[in-house]
Image (cartoon, helix red, strand yellow):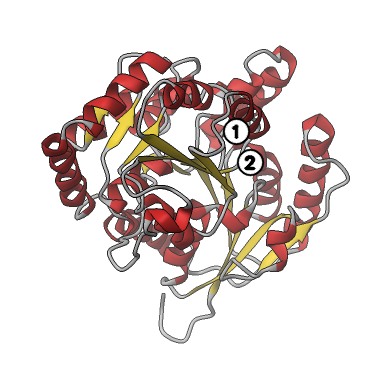
């Protein structure tokens, strides 16, 4: 920005809990280095919102509804009117569920808009069997995306799908993790786990249907000498907890709630291997490149993952783990045993993860964000604060 000019104010809209949305926080941090003021607009979700876990000003809406059609409708109306009168120079819609109000405000006020697609929203399994809801989101996507100038997403597959369907070329910024060399893992005994146990971790902010949690628990049941940490939240967590109780696995499987990334990485670094078990049941998972994959690489631990193209591409290119042909308890158990009983192979994968983390980290990936937003700010440098 020109010396002496007023700072640009960038408003990020996000519908999920901003306290644990690492992508939004990391991108906002990078944009702030361009001499921009950051505002994050979201909703109030739980006690975490009182703990000031977000290092930027946050406007949170209290919602009458927690989910469903009325929730999205109510949130979109509130977001629209807030952004309509908010002082900002650049709007950022994170995912399709915040795009419509941002698009209308962008057109009304003449403010540039960035759409950051964290996932292939119209391919979500949660709307797969809801044709009316899926039609609404597909219509929003079809009507708005061809009219956007600035689009970013998380994988080459999603970018290619947008280009094929709408003729737009989205910039790809992967959800790489920050470098974590200074973070130390817990000794296993501090986690209530015997030091001779082979410890697995299964983490995520959205542990939902078709992510392999049920099959993983069954695999632990049939595999001797193995313990498991499940860290995070999601719609199937109550089901997983019931399953652990029904199989009498409470002494071998420990649950931990969502937590800040640095805390989560202490648990991740305690593990001998990490699992990413999304099933090939929908386009969103098929096109995905989960945060946890990069967390495992950052932690320097091997990966056991399903045979999805984006994940497979990273695991095979780095040599950091095992790809299983299908998500079944038997295949998961077979991969676990292969690592547990082969120390040389385990160490080889660990070394590959460490080497991969030297390039696959946010410090490198954020350069793409810097260049992307810098060009937008240069293009709008003649605007005054709205």
User: Residue 352: x percent and y percent?
Assistant: 16, 44
Instruction: Pick the quarter of the image with the C terminus.
Output: bottom right
| SS for dot 1 | helix
Residue in view at x 30 percent, y 28 percent? 336
Residue holding disc 1:
144
Q: Compared with residue 46, is residue 198 higher up or lower down, i.e. above or below? A: above
Q: How many labels sit on residues?
A: 2
Query: From where the camera sits, is residue 46 visible?
Result: yes
| Quadrant the N terminus occupies | bottom left
Q: Position of residue 5 (x, y in %)?
A: 49, 81
Residues at marks 1 and 2, CA–CA distance in whole angstroms:
8 Å
Q: Is residue 91 visible?
A: no
Splitting the image into 4 quarters, where does residue 186 fall?
Answer: bottom left
**Dot 2: what SS?**
helix
- Residue receiving disc 2: 99
Check the image and report above or below for 149 versus 276. Answer: below
Above or below residue 364? Residue 250 is above
């Amino acid at each position: 920005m020109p010396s002496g000019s007023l700072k640009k104010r960038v408003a990020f809209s996000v519908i999920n809990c901003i306290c644990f949305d690492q992508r939004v926080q990391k991108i906002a941090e990078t944009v702030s280095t361009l001499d921009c003021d950051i505002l994050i607009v979201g909703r109030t979700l739980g006690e975490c919102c009182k703990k000031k876990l977000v290092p930027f000003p946050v406007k949170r809406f209290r919602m009458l509804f927690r989910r469903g059609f009325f929730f999205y409708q109510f949130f979109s109306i509130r977001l629209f009117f807030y952004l309509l009168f908010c002082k900002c120079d650049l709007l950022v819609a994170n995912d399709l569920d915040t795009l419509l109000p941002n698009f209308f405000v962008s057109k009304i006020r003449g403010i540039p808009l960035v759409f950051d697609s964290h996932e292939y929203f119209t391919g979500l399994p949660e709307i797969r069997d809801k044709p009316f809801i899926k039609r609404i989101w597909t219509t929003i996507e079809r009507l708005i995306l061809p009219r956007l100038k600035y689009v970013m997403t998380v994988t080459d597959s999603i970018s290619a799908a947008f280009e094929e369907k709408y003729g737009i070329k989205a910039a790809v910024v992967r959800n790489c993790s920050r470098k974590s060399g200074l973070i130390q893992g817990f000794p296993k005994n501090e986690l209530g786990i015997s030091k001779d146990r082979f410890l697995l971790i299964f983490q995520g902010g959205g542990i939902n249907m078709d992510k392999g949690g049920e099959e993983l628990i069954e695999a632990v049941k049939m595999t001797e000498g193995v313990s498991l940490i499940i860290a995070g939240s999601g719609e199937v967590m109550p089901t997983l907890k019931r399953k652990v109780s029904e199989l009498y696995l409470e002494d071998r499987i420990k649950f931990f709630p969502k937590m800040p990334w640095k805390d989560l990485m202490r648990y991740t670094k305690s593990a001998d291997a990490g699992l990413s078990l999304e099933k090939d049941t929908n386009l969103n998972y098929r096109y995905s490149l989960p945060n946890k994959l990069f967390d495992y690489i950052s932690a320097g631990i091997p990966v056991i993952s399903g045979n999805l193209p984006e994940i497979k591409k990273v695991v095979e290119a780095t040599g950091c783990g095992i790809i299983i042909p299908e998500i079944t308890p038997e295949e998961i158990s077979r991969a676990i045993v292969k690592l547990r009983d082969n120390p040389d192979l385990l160490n080889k994968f660990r070394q590959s993860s460490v080497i991969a983390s030297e390039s696959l980290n946010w410090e490198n990936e954020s350069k793409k964000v810097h260049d992307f937003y810098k060009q937008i700010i240069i293009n709008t440098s003649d605007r005054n604060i709205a």
